[in-house]
């Protein structure tokens, strides 16, 4: 019968299973359960959802030093030392590379075109739009699910659309009534038509 592995390490740049006995398998399972129990609020839901598939990871293969959980070795492991976001080490490293080229996603361009046309807004009128996909990457790096994201210059709501997609709680403030209306039509998040110079008062009221 095939052996089931619940402990992985890094070897020659690859994440590989560590061969273990049945007794070690049980010990590892107990460590996984304890890590989950002690850090339940910290561990991403996408990992907890697949609880039975969770594996332990430690780069050197030292069980007692392990503090990372993993579902799929290809996607990398999430360490409980990560208090900032819900990314695995591999995803984190990919994001912090010092430069990147972002190719606008066709479906994003289509969606923006549809909404701006509906409100009779042409590109010259609002030239500084961004792609929700790119903003989603930043939001996923700097926050966890359900955390608040405030955009004091919401424009036509790109950040708020990214909040919808990443399951964050977004609040946008936009001075221009037309842009505010587009944002409102585009997202489920809270949008306020106001001046961010009054941000203290605005956020206290809401
Ligand atoms: C660069 S655009 C934002 C674009 C937005 N990220 C998007 O992709 O749709 C900047 C926006 O800030 C708004 N703005 C400028 N000053 C503001 C203020 N004091 N309070 C609220 N909004 C303001 C402008 O009306 C403009 O829509």
Image (tube, helix red, strand yellow):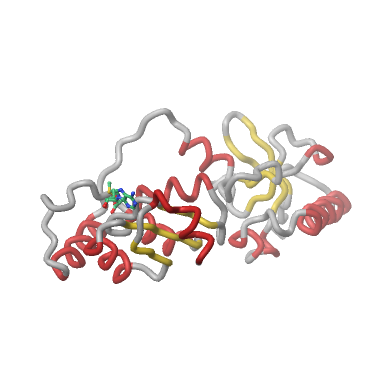
Pick whichever, 192 or 2, lies toward us: 192
| Image position, residue 14 (x, y; %) | 58, 36
Pick whichever, 113 or 9, lies toward us: 113
- Residue at image point 64% right, 32% down: 11
| Image position, residue 40 (x, y; %) | 73, 59
Q: Is residue 76 left or right of residue 29?
A: left
| Image position, residue 90 (x, y; %) | 54, 40
- Residue at image point 17% right, 63% down: 116
Pick whichever, 182 or 26, lies toward us: 182
Quarter assignment of residue 13: top right
In the image, residue 185 above or below residue 169: below
- Residue at image point 29% right, 55% down: 155
Quarter of the image with the N terminus is bottom right
- Residue at image point 44% right, 60% down: 171
Q: How many marks?
A: 0
Pick whichever, 98 or 16, lies toward us: 98
Q: Is residue 76 left or right of residue 160?
A: right
Q: Is residue 81 left or right of residue 178?
A: right
In the image, residue 35 above or below residue 191: above
């Amino acid at each position: 019968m095939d052996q089931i592995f619940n402990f992985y390490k890094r070897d020659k740049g690859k994440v590989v299973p560590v061969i273990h006995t049945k007794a070690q398998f049980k010990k590892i399972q107990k460590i996984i359960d304890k890590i989950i129990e002690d850090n339940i609020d910290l561990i991403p839901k996408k990992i907890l959802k697949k609880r039975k598939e969770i594996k332990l990871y430690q780069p050197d293969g030292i069980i007692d030093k392990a503090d990372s959980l993993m579902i799929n070795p290809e996607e990398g492991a999430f360490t409980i030392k990560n208090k900032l976001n819900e990314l695995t080490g591999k995803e984190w490293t990919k994001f912090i590379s010092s430069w990147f080229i972002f190719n606008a996603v066709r479906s994003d361009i289509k969606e923006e075109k549809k909404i701006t046309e509906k409100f009779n807004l042409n590109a010259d009128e609002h030239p500084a739009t961004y792609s929700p996909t790119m903003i989603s990457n930043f939001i996923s790096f700097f926050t966890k699910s359900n955390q608040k994201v405030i955009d004091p210059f919401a424009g036509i709501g790109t950040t708020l659309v990214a909040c919808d997609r990443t399951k964050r709680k977004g609040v946008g403030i936009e001075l221009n009534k037309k842009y505010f209306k587009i944002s409102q039509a585009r997202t489920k998040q809270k949008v306020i038509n106001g001046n961010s110079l009054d941000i203290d008062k605005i956020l206290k009221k809401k």
